[in-house]
Amino acid sequence: MSTELLKLAHTVAKMAGSHLMNRPSSFTFTEKSSAVDFATQMDQQAEELIVKQILTARPDDGIIGEEGAAKISKSGITWVIDPLDGTVNYLYGLPGWNVSIAAKDSEGVLVGVVYAPSINGFWSAVRGGDATYNGEKIKCNDPVTLDKALLSTGFAYDLDLRSTQGNVISNLLPRIRDLRRNGAAAVDLCYVAMGSLDGYFEASLSEWDHAAGGLIATQAGAVISGRAGGPANKDLVVCAGPALHAQLLPLI
């Protein structure tokens, strides 16, 4: 089943990415949790395309989509979809935005793909198998000490939470090599998976932000968790190789 799911995710992600590469000259906006949290018509169109293709192939599967698509699974498989991760990057014409698609069963995420057409990047993984980037096996950096760590983060839509995140960063900066803010959680997780970053942390992520990228990072040897080593969740996601993860987690 994993092979079938991966093939479908690959095909659908490529279709959605191709659609998104036709960036419009103007945008319509739907505000979500705040003025800085919004979707465009392209987020919605990409999700509609993805859901239609998946349910045409597998009508009994469930759906969890960032833009509101929802369906209870009858097959035991549920797809977790971020049709356009990095909407602000996309709006401003910056690279790194991506299509993130995962399929999960009762044991967790089974298949994950992340496709970033603006940087010609395609990452994928199957639970228990290798993580790949453009077809080549990848591994995270490990061991890495905190003082040599290149990290990435993102900021919440909640403006009060941003102040707390600023304090965390202020504490971290004197202890690490440097910090990046790329603007797309799924690609940040994939960068950890392939060693382009040593670690990544962010608060206020949803399942669709980290489902696919988290599997890819895990299969590349990284550890992904929430606070105190629990499951990654809305409160916190921390991802790094095992040695760095142990050093980083208490500081976030």
Image (cartoon, rainbow, N blue to C red):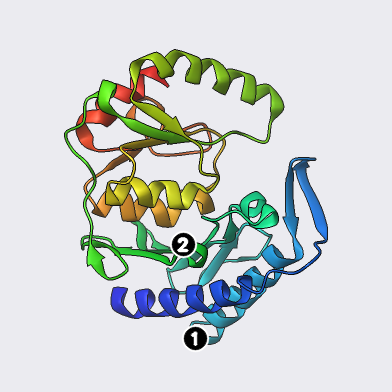
Residue type, numbered disc 2 = Ile
Q: Residues within 10 Å of mark 1 (few under 14, many from 20)?
A: few
Provide the secondary structure element on which disc 2 rests.
helix
Height in image: 192 above or below 120? above
Residue 251: image x %, image y %? 38, 18
Q: Which quadrant would the C terminus be assigned to in this image?
A: top left
Q: Which quadrant would the N terminus be assigned to in this image?
A: bottom left
* Residue ID for mark 2: 119
Q: Residues within 10 Å of mark 2 (few under 14, many from 20)?
A: few
Task: Kindly identify the residue that appears in the image at 30 percent across and 37 percent down.
Answer: 198
Query: In the picture, residue 63 is in which quadrant?
Result: bottom right
Provide the secondary structure element on which disc 1 rests.
helix
Foreground: disc 1 or disc 2? 2
Q: How far apart are marks 1 and 2 (CA)?
A: 28 Å
Residue 81: image x %, image y %? 54, 62
Whether residue 237 is visible to the viewer of this picture, yes or no, is no
* Residue ID for mark 1: 57
Residue type, numbered disc 1 = Ala
Residue 132: image x %, image y %? 27, 63
Work out whether mark 1 precedes mark 2 in sequence or the reverse, and give the earlier one. 1
The disc label shown at residue 248, or none: none
Of 96 and 67, nearer the camera is 96
Height in image: 160 above or below 157? above
Task: Kindly identify the residue that appears in the image at 40 percent across and 37 percent down.
Answer: 200
Task: Kindly identify the residue that appears in the image at 53 percent across and 48 percent down.
Answer: 184
